[in-house]
Image: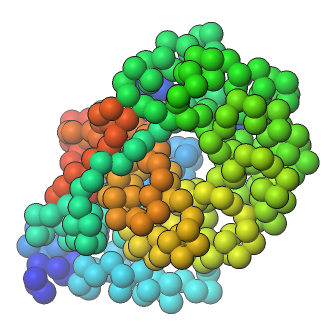
Amino acid sequence: MTEAATIVSLRARPVVVPLSRPLRTAAGAIPAAPLLLLDVTDADGVIGRAYVFGYTPITLRPLAALAESLAELVIGKPAAPSLLFDLASRQFRLLGRQGLLGMALSGLDMALWDLLGRAVGRPVAELLGGGCRAMPAYDSFGLVDPVADRAMLEASVAQGFRAIKIKVGDGSEAADADLVRAVRDIVGPEVRLMVDFNQSQDVMSAVRRIERLAPYDITWVEEPVAAEDFAGHARVRTASSVPVQTGENWWFPRDMERALAAGACDFAMPDLMKIGGVTGWVRVMGLAEAAALPLSSHLFVEASAHMLAVSPTAHFLEYLDVAGPILTAPARPVGGLVVPRGPGLGIEWDESALRRYAA
């Protein structure tokens, strides 16, 4: 495996992929998915694949240039994700790893784990000592219109989802309450309902709004205040009767450590692109187990399914398909469950679609 595990090339390709259900949030609309695709090749020609989500097409060109610049750091070295994770930590200590650099490093880590799985013909979940067990998923919506979007919500329940998330926080407190009440009526009492504020509130307004939503049996409220405001999240948590979920904007394991120290959340949902890829997730799932903290995922349904399958406190997988149109076999839930696939992370590019959506 020594020769086969030597990295010989790193390729980055930007695409903008249409979303079947464009996302509207309190922070703005996302009509399509700007993705950067990474291909890492070893000396035997095995290719590891991963993608990162740029949120806006503006990020794609600098993100691609930055990712390809990382070739200097990794080419000629063994495809050992943990070692390269620590190498990057040292290399960029003075700069810091947040932002585009962190996204590129996390994407590289995911691609390396995919390569390792493909090299031995096994799923990443098995490489990590687990198995490909089915993970319960929730269907993730943006801001919805209970009248115009009723059919979509009903279809989600009919497909077998037993949990649904919607976004709130862009209007008045009364509007939020009316929206959540209407969605609860549509999905019924047996479906779990989560709401996401997308960091749109201050502490006091978050507390007021949450109390107006509490009668509708809310499983969690997500990012009620600014993601980096751990103390604010803790204050909301103390004052709220609904559990607080956060974590999608934590940068690398240290941010999760800070959030836990502050008592910022009841639930956690790391994002593979920001937490440090597979290696970063492996390190934080131990923190979650020690804190008895239920762990969910954010985006990256294909890779996240592997990580939750080996997480001792696995809770929910977010089902939000941003890459399906460029994959030969998109991850599809069956009865509200998603099963990890291999080899590696189970990602195969549809090259004709990549040409169609090239940015």
Q: How far across and how far down the image is residue 333, in percent?
A: 32, 36
Q: How is the image coloured?
A: rainbow
Query: Closest to the observer: 77 or 338?
Result: 338
Query: Closest to the observer: 101 or 295?
Result: 295
On-image quarter of the C terminus: top left
Asked if 167 appears above or below 13 in the picture, the reply is above
Q: Is residue 212 left or right of residue 51?
A: right
User: Which residue is outermost to the top?
Assistant: 147
Q: Residue at x 67, y 18 (%)?
A: 182
Asked if 213 appears above or below 258 in the picture, the reply is above
Q: Residue at x 78, y 56 (%)?
A: 237
Q: Is residue 228 left or right of residue 328?
A: right
Q: How far across and how far down the image is residue 268, in percent?
A: 58, 59
Query: Closest to the observer: 120 or 87?
Result: 120
Quadrant hosting residue 147: top right
Q: How far across and how far down the image is residue 354, in percent?
A: 28, 40
On-image quarter of the N terminus: bottom left
Q: How far across and how far down the image is residue 251, in percent?
A: 59, 68
Q: Is residue 160 left or right of residue 269?
A: left
Q: Residue at x 82, y 33 (%)?
A: 212
Instruction: Say how many tags the image has.
Output: 0
Residue 214 seen: yes
Q: Is residue 187 left or right of residue 239?
A: left
Quadrant hosting residue 189: top right
User: Which residue is outermost to the right?
Assistant: 204
Query: Closest to the observer: 186 or 352?
Result: 186
Residue 30 seen: no
Quadrant hosting residue 107: bottom left
Q: Residue at x 79, y 40 (%)?
A: 210
